[in-house]
Amino acid sequence: MSAQTDTATLVSTGQRAAALLVRTPRALRVLSRLLGTLFVLLVALGFAPWQQSVDGTGRVVAFAPLERQQEVDAPIEGRVTRWYVREGSLVKKGDLLLELTDNDPDILQRLEEERRALMARKDAAVARATSIQSRQRALDSSRTAGIRGAESRIAMAKERSKAAKQTVDAARGAMETARLNIERQKQLFEQGLTSQRNVEVAQLEALRTATEVERALATLQAAEGEALALQADRARVEHDLTAAIDDAHAAEASALSEEASAAAELARLEVRLARQSTMEVKAPIEGTVLRLLSAQGNAFVKAGDGLLVLVPDTEDRAVELWVAGNDMPLLSNGRDVRLQFEGWPAVQFTGWPSVAVGTFGGKVALIDSTDDGSGRFRIVIRPDQRDPWPTGAYLRQGVRVNGWVLLESVTLGYELWRRFNGFPPTVKPPSAGAPGKDK
């Protein structure tokens, strides 16, 4: 019995030893379970959703360009004599910022004297032009009256010439009658029907009528000569007065030119006087003084030099993001953006924006047409009304921002495969006519 028991004990011990030799080690079992679990997780993650995105960095700005940081420039040359604000001061539109003074303390008095001299010069030119215009009217009246008088004298001379011509015709008729009377008296004398005296009387009458014809012809020539002389005198009067009127026009043009020159110089002086009178520089817009660019005292500034930097107060904010040129074609207006503001606690999961904490939403409002010279493109982000941004007390202009422009949703496995192969993200073309989308 003891031998049998020993034999059974030996067999059982051998079986346990063999079982121990063929059993899988504990470490391998644990490793296999880990690998199996990891494989299941990888398969599950391969079908998990993933949000593709394009990242960029930028800063907070005002959406309207006129409400962004701006410089207040010096309107004139001079020295800053007094500041009424300091860095961090809140100012309203029209508040006094500083006072300037010119190097010449008597500059305003000198400019006023020059202005009075130019005003006197302009008034003298106006008076001269008015006097010349009066002279022109007088010369026009004189020319009209002189021409009318000359034409009247010419008409009278023509009437006298006409009368003299009629007298010549009458004298020639009388001379012809006297000649016929001489012939008739001679015939009667030869027939003894008249006396020698009657013949002599007829001859005397013929001589008198011939003299009358010559006198009438002389009168006619004198009348015609007078008419020609009066016509020449009319032309002379007209030409002389026309020349005088032309001289008056030239003098008037010279006076008007002098008046215009004085007016132009006066306008330039008025501009200088207005600029020199602008010794007080006022705030062009409501905002906060960021930095003073000029010192008070002996610092000399020229017209156009910066005096201070002013940041306007506005709640209409936006974000400027700079993205790589390789990602720019993937973007379009209206796409959703997630933003992480510097100094604002946030936990961001790029592929799962729905579980991110401390980020804010936005919409792409503008994409620049050209780069900044280094291959980067600027996009402007407006707030998403469904996810309001922090107030202006926490979100000031210039705060740095990290942003992710959301593209399409894919599986994590596809995203890993895409990244391993260097393929671009998947982008669906925007639907035709969709509002806020680039076609």
Image (cartoon, rainbow, N blue to C red):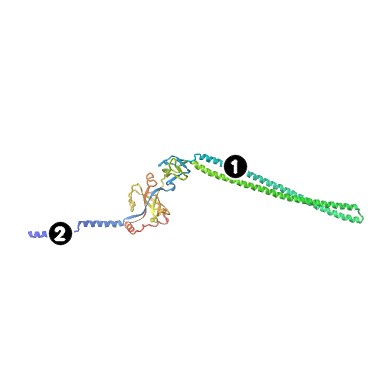
Residue type for callout 1: Ala
Which part of the image, by quadrant, shows the N terminus? Answer: bottom left
Residue 405 location (% of width, % of height): 37, 53
> Where does label 2 land, which residue?
17
Q: Do the CB atoms of the residues marked 1 and 2 lie less than 8 Å apart?
A: no
Amino acid tagged 2: Ala
Q: How many marks?
A: 2
Q: In this view, does 389 lie to the left or right of 31?
A: right
Q: Which residue is drawn at 82% across and 51% down?
A: 212
Q: x, y percentage for residue 50?
A: 33, 55
Q: In which quarter of the image is the C terminus?
A: bottom left
Percent across and percent down for residue 420 are: 32, 58
Give left or right: position of 347 versus 254: left
Mark nearer the viewer, 1 or 2: 1
Label 1 Cα neighbours within 10 Å, binned few <14 / some 14-19 / many ≥20: some
Q: Residue at coordinates 55% horizontally, 44% vertically from top-left?
A: 265
* Residue name at image x 56 percent, y 41 percent: 117
Out of 184 and 12, give the one closest to the viewer: 184
List x then y, in percent, for residue 270: 53, 43
The 10 Å Cα crowd at callout 2, few under 14, some 14 to 19, many 20 or more, is few
Give the structural element (helix, strand or loop) at label 2.
helix
Is residue 384 visible from the viewing direction of this image?
no
The residue under label 1 is: 124
Could you tell me how far apart the alpha carbons at marks 1 and 2 are, in whole angstroms?
136 Å
Q: Is residue 433 above or below residue 272?
A: below
Residue at 87% in and 54% down: 182
Left/right placement of residue 90 relative to residue 168 reads left
Q: In terms of secondary structure, where does tag 1 sit?
A: helix
